[in-house]
Image (cartoon, coloured by chain):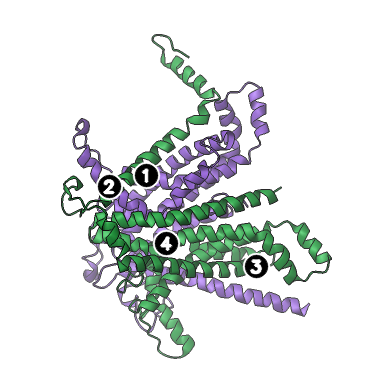
């Protein structure tokens, strides 16, 4: 491989080419930039965050090298901060409701559309639209729908025959419902899509066999289709739950976490502390606690995904 | 036979109801984008263009404002006039999203190939990468804020040049590459796994090196997969809000951040121009989305559900 003392341009290109043709190069080379990026962009800041979380630093008070040492006070403060604990609870409740409805509606719609019938393509196409609209626009769009002189109240007025003037964003309960509704509207298409492809990918033989042996449609569904569909269902739950727990865009655009902090999810809570109150050290400590909490969730998710993926591979021819 | 027809009718009724639910917010946004100030939130609601209200292109003219004097009769909107111009946000979004998506595609595809053929990084490596995507972005954003704002202070005069990542193109691009890599790697794994190894063996037996084998055998077979992956990642980056909100502004301003800027305004929100921005931002994504409709499941499920 050693090039000659003064290689010409073309020779250099040839040696580079030869080098790239070698077997071992593609084994390692692609890993390097990715690892470098991850280390410098995620690992280093992470270590820095641990250090900052032990200080008492606000971004308005100069650079952090001059900030006083705080020890674990930030962590203690976070763990006794009601706002923080409620934000955790709220996030999980929101995600729970949103994902449950998305799964139910998505599954119902998928059952109605996975087989061929007239007009099926149109439904499939229309149903996907919400998922393609970007979350910020959905949040903004719903904030407009829910104005007290807005179209939703207008429709409700027509339906009930009374003058409906619900102030959606002023009441904490309706504001919470609105955030969950927006999430359901946007992401039901995804669960729907996953279930449609899952249902139409089921092998036809066991279903036919069961029908021949005299099973009713309901029995086939419960004892043949549903068990075969389990990996797909689990994957849908995991993917949606992971995304729903991050929820930020909708409450941010709809309510900014309000009224009060009725729709303050974890992401909004951390954002407020870091960017509105400038309590960087506190936010860093709280986000490390969130990280610990999430690492449990992530670990479980990965384990589930791994298991179900292996099952899918088995079924696949 | 009659039972079948009733069932079919019922099916269409349920699906039709959901179509209404899906289309209503979209319809409302597009409708509002053609309304002038007085019609935005008037009660009773103005539904029908030309009947209830006179449609106008004012909002679109406002966001695509180029220069010169505006039309007369818009005095009350004069103050917010400049703020709604969309060109800067559009340029920032296009530059950042395009560079980040292409870079992510190239890095991720190469690595996916190595993982598929050599198990580079070990059996669990793809799952390790997946954890990046599962972290809530806010938990990444806080360290990044500290990191990005510290870099210029720590390396103040490194070689005379000032290194800036906060509120710059490069800062966001690097982050977008890192956060979309899991998707690229998993989607491309699904596509590359489908290329039969026998083809590569045959090429190698005929004396082709690894690079030529990839270029002449593998690449043509996964090129369409790479296009799908690129578009998918493009949509993700185009929609990204949290990181852009927290780590850029005011110098770099992507479209989602631009849209948010006026949301918290207390004194009378300007629904019309916002609806126009929302519509304009949405159109390219919906088009791209339908182009890769068949592969959306593969994308969102990290290639685990493959059809």
- The chain coloured green is A
Q: Is residue B276 visible?
A: yes
> According to the rendering, which colour does chain B have?
purple
In front: label 2 or label 1:
2
> Between marks 2 and 4, how big is the CA–CA gap?
34 Å
> Between marks 3 and 2, how big is the CA–CA gap?
52 Å
At 68% across and 59% down in the image, what residue appears? A228
In front: label 4 or label 1:
1
Cβ atoms at labels 3 and 1 below 8 Å apart: no
Which residue in the protein does label 4 denote?
A135
Cβ atoms at labels 4 and 1 below 8 Å apart: no
Of mark 2 and mark 4, the one earlier in the sequence is 2
Q: To which chain does the residue with label 4 belong?
A: A
Of mark 3 and mark 4, the one earlier in the sequence is 3
Of mark 3 and mark 1, the one earlier in the sequence is 1
Q: Are marks 4 and 1 on the same chain?
A: yes
Q: Callout 1 environment at 10 Å: few (<14), some (14 to 19), or many (20+)?
A: some
Q: Answer with left or right where residue A225 lies relative to residue B60.
A: right
Q: Callout 3 environment at 10 Å: few (<14), some (14 to 19), or many (20+)?
A: some
Cβ atoms at labels 2 and 4 below 8 Å apart: no
At 48% across and 40% down in the image, what residue appears? B108
Of mark 2 and mark 1, the one earlier in the sequence is 1
At 68% across and 56% down in the image, what residue appears? A201
Q: Residue furthest right?
A: A213
């Amino acid at each position: 491989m050693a090039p000659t003392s003064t290689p010409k341009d073309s020779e250099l290109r040839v040696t580079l080419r030869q080098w790239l043709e070698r077997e071992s190069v593609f084994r390692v080379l692609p890993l390097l930039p990715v690892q470098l990026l991850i280390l410098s962009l995620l690992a280093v800041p992470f270590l820095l965050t641990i250090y900052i979380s032990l200080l008492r630093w606000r971004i308005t008070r100069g650079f952090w090298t001059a900030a006083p040492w705080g020890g674990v006070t930030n962590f203690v403060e976070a763990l006794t901060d009601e706002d923080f604990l409620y934000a955790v609870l709220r996030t999980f409740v929101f995600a729970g409701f949103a994902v449950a409805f998305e799964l139910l509606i998505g599954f119902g719609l998928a059952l109605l559309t996975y087989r061929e019938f007239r007009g099926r393509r149109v439904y499939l196409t229309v149903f996907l639209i919400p998922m393609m609209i970007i979350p910020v626009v959905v949040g903004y769009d719903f904030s407009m729908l829910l104005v007290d002189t807005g179209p939703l109240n207008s429709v409700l007025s027509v339906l009930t025959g009374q003058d409906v003037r619900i102030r959606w964003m002023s009441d904490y309960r309706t504001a919470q419902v609105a955030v969950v509704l927006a999430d359901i509207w946007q992401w039901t298409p995804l669960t729907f899509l996953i279930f449609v492809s899952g249902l139409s990918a089921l092998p036809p033989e066991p279903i036919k066999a069961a029908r021949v042996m005299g099973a009713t449609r309901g029995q086939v569904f419960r004892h043949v289709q549903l068990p075969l569909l389990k990996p797909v269902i689990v994957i849908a739950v995991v993917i949606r739950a992971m995304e729903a727990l991050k929820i930020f865009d909708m409450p941010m655009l709809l309510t900014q976490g309000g009224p009060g902090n009725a729709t303050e999810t974890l992401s909004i809570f951390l954002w407020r502390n870091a960017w509105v109150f400038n309590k960087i050290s506190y936010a860093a400590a709280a986000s490390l606690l969130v990280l610990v909490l999430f690492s449990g969730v992530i670990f479980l998710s990965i384990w589930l995904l791994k298991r179900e993926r292996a099952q899918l591979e088995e079924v696949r021819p | 036979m009659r039972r079948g027809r009733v069932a079919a009718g019922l099916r269409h009724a349920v699906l039709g109801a959901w179509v209404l639910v899906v289309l209503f917010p979209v319809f409302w946004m597009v409708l509002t984008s053609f309304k002038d100030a007085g019609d935005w939130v008037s009660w009773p609601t103005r539904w029908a263009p030309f009947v209830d209200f006179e449609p106008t292109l004012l909002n679109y003219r406002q966001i695509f404002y180029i220069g010169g004097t505006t039309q007369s009769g818009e005095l009350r909107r004069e103050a917010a006039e400049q703020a709604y111009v969309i060109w800067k946000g559009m340029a920032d979004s296009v530059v950042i999203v395009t560079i980040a998506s292409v870079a992510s595609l190239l890095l991720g595809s190469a690595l996916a190939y190595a993982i598929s053929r050599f198990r580079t990084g070990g059996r669990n490596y793809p799952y390790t990468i997946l954890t990046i995507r599962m972290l809530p972005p806010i938990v990444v954003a806080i360290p990044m804020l500290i990191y990005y704002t510290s870099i210029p202070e720590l390396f103040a005069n490194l070689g005379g040049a000032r290194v800036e990542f906060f509120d710059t193109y490069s800062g966001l691009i690097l982050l977008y590459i890192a956060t979309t890599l899991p998707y690229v790697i998993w989607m491309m794994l699904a596509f590359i796994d489908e290329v039969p190894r026998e083809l590569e063996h045959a090429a190698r037996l005929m004396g082709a090196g690894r690079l030529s084998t990839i270029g002449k055998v593998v690449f043509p077979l996964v090129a369409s997969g790479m296009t799908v992956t690129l578009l998918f990642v493009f949509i993700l980056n185009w929609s990204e809000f949290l990181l852009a909100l927290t780590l850029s502004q005011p110098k770099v301003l992507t479209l989602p951040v631009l849209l948010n800027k006026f949301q918290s305004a207390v004194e009378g929100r300007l629904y019309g121009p916002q609806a126009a921005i929302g519509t304009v931002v949405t159109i390219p994504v919906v088009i791209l989305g339908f182009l890769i409709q068949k592969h959306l499941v593969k994308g969102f499920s990290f290639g685990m559900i493959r059809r």
